Amino acid sequence: MVKQRREIAMSPPEVAAFLAERHIATMCTRNWDGSIHAVAMWYGFLDGRLAVQTKAKSQKVRNLERDPRMTCLVHAGERYEELRGVELVGRAVRVEDAEQLFAVGASVFDRYVAAYTEEVRGVVESMLQKRVAFVLDVERTVSWDHRKLDAIVPR
């Protein structure tokens, strides 16, 4: 099984390409009692790092202020032989700079709503009212692509 796990792992360029696709991330933080708080999130990028923006008073923000550890799982596929995904484990860093916060908002808008242009700048700015952003400093990446299983175990 260990060999198979290595064989189905994505290469760094495959991970980057997969994350650049339009997926939903499951973002996990730790609640005050140690339980996991998992939420579905749209994500963007800031300086090549995965970034999320959310309401400033949300549970995930309170959790990250107490404990910056964060895990994001991004996955795709319906059937076992199609499953692929990337787990990013690391520490969240709050985006303090207003221009960088806007860049995260524009990235998320561009990925999930519509192509970002200066004509929609006001829409993005209004979306960011009472919101904060975090980037993930990745410490560990785990990936898998079950579409590679055919090459390992012919059907």
Image (tube, rainbow, N blue to C red):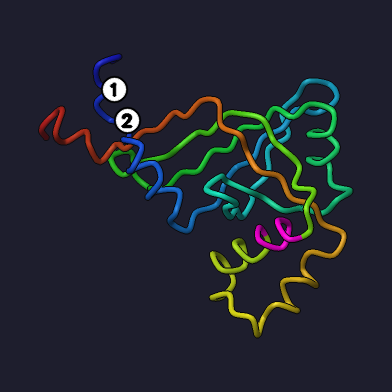
Find the magenta span and give its range. Answer: 99-104
Q: Residue at 67% x, 50% y: name it.
A: 52
Using the rendered view, name the quadrant where residue 4 is placed: top left
| Quadrant location, the N terminus | top left
In the image, residue 3 sits, relative to residue 122, either above or below, namely: above
Tag 1 secondary structure? helix
Tag 2 secondary structure? loop
**Dot 2: few (<14), some (14–19), or many (≥20) neighbours within 10 Å?**
some
Q: Is residue 149 left or right of residue 74?
A: left
| Quadrant location, the C terminus | top left
Q: Amino acid at mark 2?
A: Ala
In the image, residue 48 sits, relative to residue 33, either above or below, namely: below
Cα separation, mark 2 vs mark 1, equals: 5 Å
Can residue 101 be found in the magenta stretch?
Answer: yes
Residue at numbered disc 1: 6
**Dot 1: few (<14), some (14–19), or many (≥20) neighbours within 10 Å?**
few
Q: Residue at 51% x, 25% y: name it.
A: 140
Mark 2 touching mark 1, by CB under 8 A?
Answer: yes
Across and down, in percent, residue 3 comes to 24, 16
Q: Residue at 69% x, 35% y: name it.
A: 92
Can residue 105 be found in the magenta stretch?
Answer: no
Q: Residue furthest top?
A: 2
Q: Amino acid at mark 1?
A: Arg
Using the rendered view, name the quadrant where residue 101 is placed: bottom right
